[in-house]
Image (cartoon, rainbow, N blue to C red):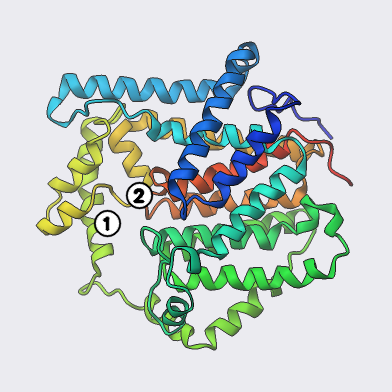
Amino acid sequence: MPSPTTLRPCPTVPAGWMAGPCLLLLLVWASVPFTLTDMARLAAQLLVLAALVLSLRQWRDCLRHPLCWLLLAALALQLTSWGLSHWLHPQLAERSPRLHRLAAWFFLIPVALFAGGARQGVALCWLSALLALLLLPWTTGNGWEELGRGIGGERVSFGLLNAQHTALLFGAALLGVWLVPANVLAPSLRDSPAGHLARPLLIASCLYGVLLSQTRGVWLALLCGIAAAVVFRSWRGRRLRASALLLPLVLVMASPLGDAVYERLQSESPGNLQENVRVRLATWDESMHWIAQRPALGWGGQGRAAVVRASAGLSDDERNRFRHLHSSYLDILVNWGGAGLLLYATLLGWLSLHFWRSWRGGILPEPVFTFWCAFLPYWLVANGFESFVFYQSGAYLFALVAGGCLALCRGERAAA
């Protein structure tokens, strides 16, 4: 079996006083991103600063690492697109290049650095995020009252920006809980009765979160992720316990929520499109004209908002409310052109190849690699219907999953 190449995020975290505080900051960031947003933002900024300090101390390692070159390419692309927008269409140019927009894709680097090579660090990070997600109905939502309304058929969001973001987070959590048993990251739980009992309860809770938020794009993405996991495990000659998902789903469909799910699936017709579908179709059609005019480097950071303002068939209220195209890929193409989309595809491709080599080399546990195989199509499909990569929820989720997997690639060989 071929061994993977040296799989270090740049740079290597030194043992000593810095490791503990940075892990604590990482757990804070993972635990309170939607409840104490200022605290989470401060923790993220400190983690970036710590990663920068380590990069300067070990700059030779940085220059050899593909992720660092991709990050530099993202910064250069934004500066180039911003400069061209001032030259070619200054009326759309922003005062500053807003480098954080594409740099946010690379927050997985601090996550991977400070979760450490040990599985316990990743386990703590993912567990903190899962608990924060399950508590959303009470920390940012309206508690039992909102849950009751959701089960009765009302679309709920638990206090997040909208229900699409709620669905995205719960869907990813569902894949993670289903595919990665707790004992993979915490071997001490291998024979724990509590672990065996908690897993089906967590699966049911995440499934309810996905369905209560009534987001069809995420439902489709989830089906694609589940199919990818089943295909991969079948190729490996191993079965997945589909009953862990089927039993809660049967119970849901037999409840009042089942009727709401069916109505949601049947709610569109060619002559009666809801606002979210109508706005998407109008802006997507308009975006094609803008992409054709600037296919290489796009229109800069204000491009997608300009497309919305130019879209025919939208009311003045809709033009004022929406500033994006409800598709990460169209947003990237309009703002940064084919170069931006190529950069994003390269990032995902490098990560996937990196994880595959780590799994083949016996370092990345197979359940975690299966999770990535399910998460990748889930993420790709979900972003076709919403601009998640440019929102806090999407940046948080991608950094958490990709950064956690990357941290595990630095560990010891997995047990056979």
Residue 39 appears at what percent x and percent y?
48, 44
Residue 251 appears at what percent x and percent y?
59, 84
Compared with residue 105, is residue 281 higher up or lower down, i.e. above or below?
A: below
Mark 1 is surrounded, within 10 Å at the Cα level, by few (under 14), some (14 to 19) or many (20 or more) other residues, namely some
Q: Which residue is mark 2?
A: 327
Spatial separation of the CA atoms under disc 1 and disc 2: 8 Å
Compared with residue 150, is residue 370 higher up or lower down, i.e. above or below?
A: above
Q: Secondary structure at mark 2?
A: loop
Residue at left offset 76%, top offset 45%: 120
Q: Is residue 224 shown to the viewer in this render? A: no
Compared with residue 127, is residue 25 higher up or lower down, i.e. above or below?
A: above
Q: CB of mark 1 within 8 Å of CB of mark 2?
A: yes
Residue type at the position of mark 1? Arg
Q: Secondary structure at mark 1?
A: helix
Quarter location, residue 230: bottom right
Residue 286 appears at what percent x and percent y?
19, 47
Compared with residue 208, is residue 102 higher up or lower down, i.e. above or below?
A: above
Q: Which residue is mark 1?
A: 280
Left or right, 151 with reference to 31:
left
